[in-house]
Amino acid sequence: MDSKRFSAFRTTAVCGLALCVMLLAGCGGGRGTTTIKGTVKTADGKPVTGGTLTIAPVDAGGEASPVGTQVGSDGTFSVAAPQGKAKLTYVDPGAQFPKDYTPKPSEPAPLSPFAGMSVVKPDVEIKAGESLDVTIGKGGK
């Protein structure tokens, strides 16, 4: 590796490491974090296929930031989140065509079947070692 490439590599590595340290230092404050795994389902028990789940700490005194995670195609998620009281929000994946479908020119993509749905019980307590099952519906808050 020549000196210019090594210097660029070293600079990128140092910047990446510094960014990771800053992000980790800002996560959770004194609350501690834990990895939360769970599922997102509709009110009739069907898994949600996509979208974003956000966990926003409540009464953190500005010490913890909200964290978001993608909901998998099977409705599962996993995210490192601050422990304690939190408020959940869900955002649907938006309009999209089904896989392996070729749309006609100017054909609009169909809305997600989860459009307009929100978390039914958004106020939760994040605890280490516990899973989090989330239900969304049209009657959410």
Image: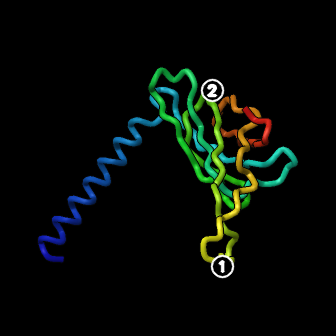
Q: Residue at x 66, y 50 (%)?
A: 92
**Is 93 in front, or is 80?**
93
Q: Going from the N terminus, do you reach mark 1 or mark 2 first?
A: 2
Q: Nearer the viewer, residue 93 or 105?
A: 105
Q: Which residue is mark 2?
A: 85
Q: Please give the count of numbered marks on the rendered protein.
A: 2
Instruction: Give coordinates of residue 86: x percent, y percent.
Output: 62, 30
Is residue 41 placed above or below 32 in the rendered structure?
A: below
Q: Which residue is mark 1?
A: 102
Task: Identify which amino acid the numbered label 1 is placed on.
Answer: Thr
Quadrant in which the C terminus appears: top right
Q: Is residue 18 left or right of residue 68?
A: left
Measured along the vertical axis of the image, is residue 31 above or below residue 117? above
Q: Residue at x 52, y 28 (%)?
A: 31
* Residue at (57% x, 39% y) in the render: 34
The quadrant of the picture occupied by the N terminus is bottom left
**10 sits left or right of 54 in the view:** left
Q: Residue furthest front?
A: 106
Q: Are marks 1 and 2 in contact (CB under 8 Å)?
A: no
- Which residue: 21% across, 62% down? 10
- SS for dot 1: loop
Please, what secondary structure does the residue beneath circle 2 have? Answer: strand
